[in-house]
Image (cartoon, helix red, strand yellow):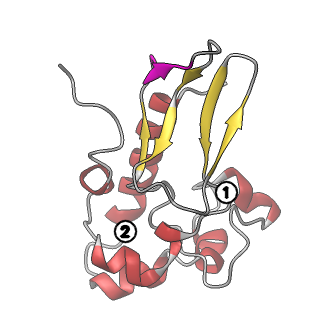
Amino acid sequence: MMTYEEWFIQQGNLHANVMKKLTDKSVDEVIEYFKFENMVKNEPDFCPLYKDNKKCHDMEDLNCYLCACPNFRFKMEGFEKTPDGKTLFSVCNIKSRDGSQYIGEDYIHQNCSGCIVPHRAKYIKKNFNRNWFEVMKDVRPKES
């Protein structure tokens, strides 16, 4: 099983590889390129769901530019222990009403599957940066 950190680095690198092909494109053209339908066809290795033509979020006009959300926060060692001994590993920084939690025997993880905030072109354009790691800079804690 992949850790948040491993996934974060892998996704950022996949994103950078796609962006290398789009250096001559405008912001709007880049956002257009990252539409789900285009990505399934043009970048089949970007997401494991693409091989089954499956979306991670059930929405029209799904855009994959922000495959992960800039509002997601994770901490490998956990943010805190709850009174019942579970470790809170990830949270939504904006406390989206469409988010929820996966609660297991000894862990709690943020569940973003009901939230579509970062997958709309308008949101992407507002937060756009050609460097995915820059857009996502607050997702993981700073080194102390």
Residue 99 in view here? yes
Residue at the image position 73 percent from the left and 72 percent from the top: 58
x, y percentage for residue 49?
Answer: 73, 56
Q: Secondary structure at mark 2?
A: loop
x, y percentage for residue 50?
Answer: 71, 61
Q: Which residues are magenta?
A: 77-82
Looking at the image, tell me whether mark 2 or mark 1 is earlier in sequence order. 2
x, y percentage for residue 30?
Answer: 37, 79
Residue positioned most to the front: 83
Answer left or right for 8 relative to 45: left
Chief secondary structure of the magenta span? loop
Q: Amino acid at mark 1?
A: Ser
Residue positioned most to the left: 144
Residue at the image position 45 percent from the left and 63 percent from the top: 66
Determine whether 41 is above or below 20 in the image. below
The residue singled out by tag 2 in the image is 21
How many neighbours does mark 1 have within 10 angstroms: few (below 14), some (14-19), or many (20 or more)? Answer: few
Determine whether 114 is above or below 121 in the image. above
Residue 78 in view here? no
Q: Amino acid at mark 2?
A: Lys
Answer left or right for 112 relative to 48: left
Was residue 22 drawn as part of the magenta stretch in this picture?
no
The foreground one among 50 and 137 is: 137
CA gap, disc 2 to disc 1?
29 Å
Residue 13's disc is none
Query: Where is the N terminus found, in terms of image quarters?
Result: top right
Q: Are marks 2 and 1 in contact (CB under 8 Å)?
A: no
| Quarter occupied by residue 84 | top right
Residue 113's disc is 1
The foreground one among 33 and 98 is: 98
Residue at the image position 65 percent from the left and 79 percent from the top: 37
x, y percentage for residue 61?
Answer: 61, 84
